[in-house]
Amino acid sequence: MRDEFVDEDEVKLFIGGRGLGVKILIEELKPGTDPLGPENKLLFMTGPATGTAFPTSGRFHVITKSPQTGGIGDTNCGGTFGPELRFAGYEGIIIEGKAAEPVYLWIREGEAEIRSAKRYWGKGTWGAEDGIRKELEAPNAKIVSIGPAGENLVMCAAIINDKHRAAGGTAAGAVMGSKQLKAIAVRGTKKLPVADEKKLKEAVQTASNMFRESRITGQSLPTYGTAIAVNIINKYGLLPTRNFQTGVFPAAEKISGETIAKTILVKGKACWGCPIACGRVIRITQAPYQVEGGGPEYEAIWALGPQCYIDDLNAIVKANNLCDELGMDPVSYGNTLGCAMELSERGKISKEKLGGLELKFGNPQAIVELTWRTAYRLGFGDDIALGAKRLAEKYGAPELAMHVKGLELPAYDPRGAQGQGLAYATSNRGGCHLRTYMIGPEIFGVPQQLDRFATKGKAQWVKTFQDLFATCDSAVFCKSATFAIWVPEIVEMLNAITGWNWSSDELLKAGDRIYTLERLFINREGFGRKDDTLPKRLLKEPMPEGPSKGHVVKLGAMLGEYYALRGWKDGKPTPEKLKELGLCKYANL
Amino acid sequence: MRDEFVDEDEVKLFIGGRGLGVKILIEELKPGTDPLGPENKLLFMTGPATGTAFPTSGRFHVITKSPQTGGIGDTNCGGTFGPELRFAGYEGIIIEGKAAEPVYLWIREGEAEIRSAKRYWGKGTWGAEDGIRKELEAPNAKIVSIGPAGENLVMCAAIINDKHRAAGGTAAGAVMGSKQLKAIAVRGTKKLPVADEKKLKEAVQTASNMFRESRITGQSLPTYGTAIAVNIINKYGLLPTRNFQTGVFPAAEKISGETIAKTILVKGKACWGCPIACGRVIRITQAPYQVEGGGPEYEAIWALGPQCYIDDLNAIVKANNLCDELGMDPVSYGNTLGCAMELSERGKISKEKLGGLELKFGNPQAIVELTWRTAYRLGFGDDIALGAKRLAEKYGAPELAMHVKGLELPAYDPRGAQGQGLAYATSNRGGCHLRTYMIGPEIFGVPQQLDRFATKGKAQWVKTFQDLFATCDSAVFCKSATFAIWVPEIVEMLNAITGWNWSSDELLKAGDRIYTLERLFINREGFGRKDDTLPKRLLKEPMPEGPSKGHVVKLGAMLGEYYALRGWKDGKPTPEKLKELGLCKYANL
């Protein structure tokens, strides 16, 4: 173990978090590195905003090479771990190599210790969190851990913090498992450096007012959580149903945020320092899905619900909760389940594999029982553990996997939101709503209303979102903040913290630099224009019904414009662009 | 690895199987050996009957020092593994030491090989069976394996053969797990030696007729499986309900063998060479408990049903099936669950431990979800994994554990069958119906009807059963055979196989010798008169209702007579008795 230091100049180029992470990864990893081998690295990063008064800054970012996609693996997570890591005096952690036996890391101010995790191996994330806190006699330690899914190298494995916050997607949990690293515990009380306390206080005051006044961050999310989106997205006919066979789910109301609030909600719950508190605490007292604890996000409800044609809210909530405990991302898990159900209904999967479990749309038992089977790779769970892309390939129908670059798509059918289609296709990490949330302008009208079926001008919006979200993940605060504040407010707070004097353009240019560097990383691994695409279903099969009826994603109409705006050619940055961004050395130019 | 040989003289003293096993164990194990340490040994034994034309001889016996009781651990299992081991040229296997990494054993005629089982570790028994057959390209290999329960040293861990036959009780599965031995695969085609083929054929013919003519083995068991007992035992008011709080279960009909036959039964299934075929193949198509495969025995139905006050047959069948896959004995598991439910209802277990799961009598979710949690030791499953005795001690109410010598009691409340009470109390392996089945004469009238509330004369019956069953487990055939045939028929077939010329008395004397040697083994580990007892509830609390109302077990009235018949004093064999049986050397006399 050793401490490393980063030059201020590098920080100014990449901000921190995701940006600094991809810089370190591309410098230190050879192309073609086995993501599950000891040569891969796993980075837990914070940024300059993390743990400060910047609202929603209770987060951290994980960066690694993804075993699921073979490209950039990165994922952002709330909870309490990010701030605590900074309070302990560290901006990030780089995990290298592989332990000979299961271990965990215990970090205090200026101290780090590797300890045996043998007693926690094979157990869930909750047992690990509780056990480690007890073992260390550190009730206030903040912990990230993996469950059996990560240990067993499952492709939907996540890293869990605070029992219910997940760093999901791209199988970062499996990388942690491959290193036999069960958990990281941190504890610290250091004060964070802020360049101009007074200026920050004023800027935070302005931002806080905007959080409060925003309809979304001030009302909808606190009251209903992210699940407020269920009814809205369904109303516009883009709630993906039965593995994206349609965008209309008849029973949306039964699984909506409003229904949760009326039935099983105990209270809302905030990540560290968040004024929104979109997290849910729920309680279900009715068998066979009794559960108490964290409630599902919108994306999880969709993946375990409409994607699998399930309208049993209790089953969805139970499966989601088990995902947290077993260390799985419910979005990738549920998307893959829906794919398996379609494969099964099309006769591609023999009944012998299933032990009596009917793998068909609408079976709530499947989404619950397969959490266990997937995490421990028992029976058909061993196949779900492959993720949608490899599963569909194994059963001879690759076109039925709803993914981009190997990452399962989330909860919006882009046939009903063209810009989101371009966003999925061009996302460096794979099909995802967390690199660009075009649903904001295309559906919610935030920051302004766009025509969701139009293609013109969407490329610029997608690029701006990609660059902006890259800065969110690098300064490290929550993307939900952008429902309330926008670039000027972010720059103002960031300048106050760092003492920089950035303009809005400079912030977005840093985002452009980070996004382009990620693209260099995946280019190096063989990704190019051929991978900036969507499942055939979304490009060729018109939406069969509802308010988005008749539409496909007109990707071709947007992709050229996007590449031009980015200064990319065939999905690869041009030398001119790299020069502009100061990235030539990463492309050996 | 090496071959060992046993003298014919020793075989004549101990027959084989269980008898020879305990002889080897007491000779080779030091007193005080850690049952989960490398010094413990794990024996898989067959006997002279195994795999011959002797009806019901498709079995094997496992002998070890029990980590659950600290005494003799032994358990008998059907399926196909026993005969196959003999066909491969071996009478038994002695596992010593501990592997450095997970392994399995592959035995063919005259050959044995240790192979890596890393890819199966953490998985279920079914995955191990299927995977190993595929890996070895040996579709006809017969396999015993453990599931995660055995790997995780769970106290209800069993060893599973043919996916649904369990060597349960006394945690033999945990011993196998402690040695990192995932499985044993065998394949052989050798012909077994029979001294007098013609005489055996005649004797088998006689026995077969008796199997066919018996009401129990010819009709009830083939038609309804062992679950035929549910309604009968309930009718007599000794079906233990809510952790032995009463002997009447109002909904017995819903979970009976008759109901199974009418609803979910696909067909019966026989172990190797069995004319009874009491095994069940079931199919449940209704969520949330869809399942297809092995159905539950009477004991499992009881443990997961009335013991936990569950009348949902589907939940019982699902939980039982998961026990098979995860490698658990449903009897010990269900008994422990019922104990946990009573502890919980009495306020001994805090809700925090349960994550929203209501641990109360009648909750079907509990019996299903806790299979996973127990096998993998997640959440409260880590406590169920202790077994009833240690669980109740942990929560400060040892009197609520329904066990004898640490082994959980099975499915008959002895307040309604006095002889069975003496049988439980004096069983060397702990509370169990497989050392003496007084339910035969006390309830079913087989081999003759006794007054179930009487105590006089029961000691002799118990001793005879114990001795007879010791010979069943040592010649190695099924105890259910004794519903149809008795000592003379058994001796006739055994003599034809071995060429011996035993009388009925000589057979029972061998049983006496085996039973007494086991007693010496447990005496050496500290067991004595104080352990030949029953839970206080059965001795002090009169049955509150039903046809057994008002009764307690009058153990004192029977125990003295029993010791006298055995030639024991204070639970220990006298020197005179040891001399008579030729066992002096095992007591250092």
Image (cartoon, coloured by chain):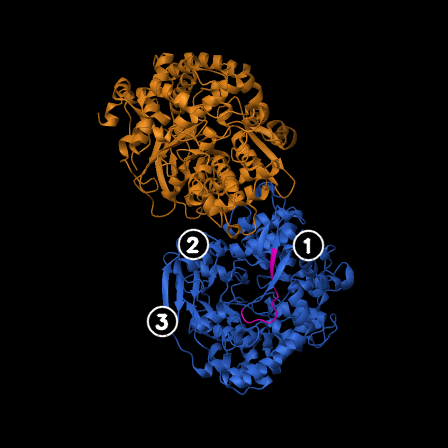
Chain colours: A blue, B orange
Q: Nearer the viewer, residue A436 or B191?
A: A436
Q: Which residues are magenta?
A: A272-282
- The percent position of residue B179, horizontal first and vertical second, equals 36, 42
Left or right of A129 on screen, residue A101: left
First of labels 2, 1 by sequence position: 2
Which quadrant is home to the C terminus of chain B? Answer: top left
The chain containing the residue under callout 3 comes to A
Task: Give the residue at x 72% y 57%.
Answer: A252
Left or right of B351 on screen, residue B171: left
**Mark toward the viewer: 2 or 3:** 2
Q: Quadrant of residue B232?
A: top right
Residue furthest toward the left?
A: B589
- The amino acid type found where label 3 is placed reads Arg
A442 up-or-down from B466: above or below: below
Reading the image, the residue beneath label 1 is: A242
- The percent position of residue A527, horizontal first and vertical second, equals 55, 68
Helix, strand or loop at label 1? It is loop
- The amino acid type found where label 1 is placed reads Arg
Reading the image, the residue beneath label 2 is: A120
First of labels 3, 1 by sequence position: 3
Give the crowd class for mark 1: few <14, some 14-19, many >=20 residues within 10 Å: many
Give the crowd class for mark 2: few <14, some 14-19, many >=20 residues within 10 Å: many
Q: Are marks 2 and 1 in contact (CB under 8 Å)?
A: no
Question: Can the viewer see residue B284?
Answer: yes
Which quadrant is home to the N terminus of chain B? Answer: top left
Q: CA distance from mark 3 to mark 1?
A: 49 Å
Reading the image, the residue beneath label 3 is: A2
Helix, strand or loop at label 3? It is loop
- The amino acid type found where label 2 is placed reads Tyr
- The percent position of residue B274, horizontal first and vertical second, equals 50, 23
A367 up-or-down from B250: above or below: below
